[in-house]
Image: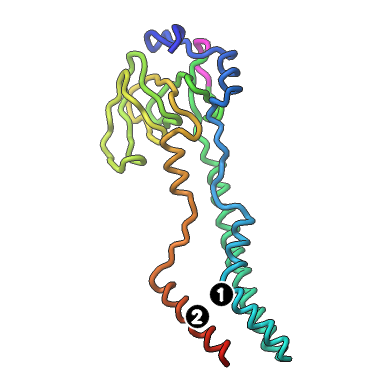
Amino acid sequence: MSDTETGQAGELQGLSDREVMARRAEGKGNNIPRSSSRPYRQIFNENLFTFINAAFFTISLVMFLLGRVGDGILVAVVIFGGVLVNIGQEIWAKRKLDEIALLYRPKAIVIREGKEQNVDPSEIVLGDLLVLRPGDQIVVDGAIIGDGKIEVDESLLTGESDSIPKMVGVPVYSGSFCVSGTACYQAEKVGTDTVAHKLMTGARAFRQVLTPVQHEINVVIRVFLLIACFL
């Protein structure tokens, strides 16, 4: 911490504009690409290229080769119709998630050159001084500095609803909220190094977990496919 970043809460100077630009150029900014859901290509691939679709389209092709044009068209239309419905539902859900991600953009208050500024969290750099007041979200990991004292709600991170007191030297983590008091903290981890980003990355990872009923349905479908191929 430089001399300009020490002292009482009311005397904190923070980083200068030149220091901010230099640290951002060094890749020490908090600019994280926003990604609320799966890309369109992944949605199409996961709905089109499946074992079940391949099997039914193969059966449809065989029916065409055998001259059963009507049966072949029926199988293709039914399967393709189901694929279109699934793709449409997932695209609609993706767009809603993207809209929510755009609406929910918390602001942060930083101290730079002795003045408070409202900035987007993506503009924060390593070493920035941030101000916390009741209701403010902690957007990067850091530690309390100065003589302020606050109570923090970390229920989103730990599941515990009790307010945690924070004072000078005590770490604070992104994803938590200030519920009372006023204090300043210095950004020690930004971008992909923060606790909140690591938790969100794991939570947003798409996992296709089948229920027991879905497993049983897949077994039945495979059995009927074998019977159909035999016939």
Q: Position of residue 16 (x, y in %)?
A: 55, 12
Q: Which residue is mark 1?
A: 52
Circles 1, 2 touching at the beta carbon (< 8 Å): yes
Q: Which residues are magenta?
A: 113-117
What is the spatial separation of the Cα atoms under label 1 and label 2, in whole angstroms? 8 Å
Near-viewer residue (38 or 8):
38
User: Residue at coordinates 47% horizontally, 19% vertically from top-left?
Assistant: 127
| Relative height, residue 58 to residue 184 (above, below) | below
Q: Position of residue 159 (x, y in %)?
A: 30, 43
Near-viewer residue (202 or 90):
202
Q: Position of residue 31 (x, y in %)?
A: 56, 32
Q: Quadrant of the C terminus?
A: bottom right
| Relative height, residue 81 to residue 130 (above, below) | below
Quadrant of the image occupied by residue 150: top left
Three-letter code, disc 1: Ile
User: Residue at coordinates 35% horizontally, 40% vertically from top-left?
Assistant: 157
| Relative height, residue 68 to residue 45 (above, below) | below
| Relative height, residue 97 to residue 134 (above, below) | below
Q: Quadrant of the N terminus?
A: top left
Label 1 crowd bin: few (<14), some (14–19), many (20+), radius 10 Å = some
Q: Which residue is mark 2?
A: 221
User: Residue at coordinates 36% horizontally, 17% vertically from top-left?
Assistant: 145
Tell me, yes or no, whether the highlighted magenta stretch contains residue 203. Answer: no
**Magenta part, dominant SS:** strand
Near-viewer residue (133 or 2):
2
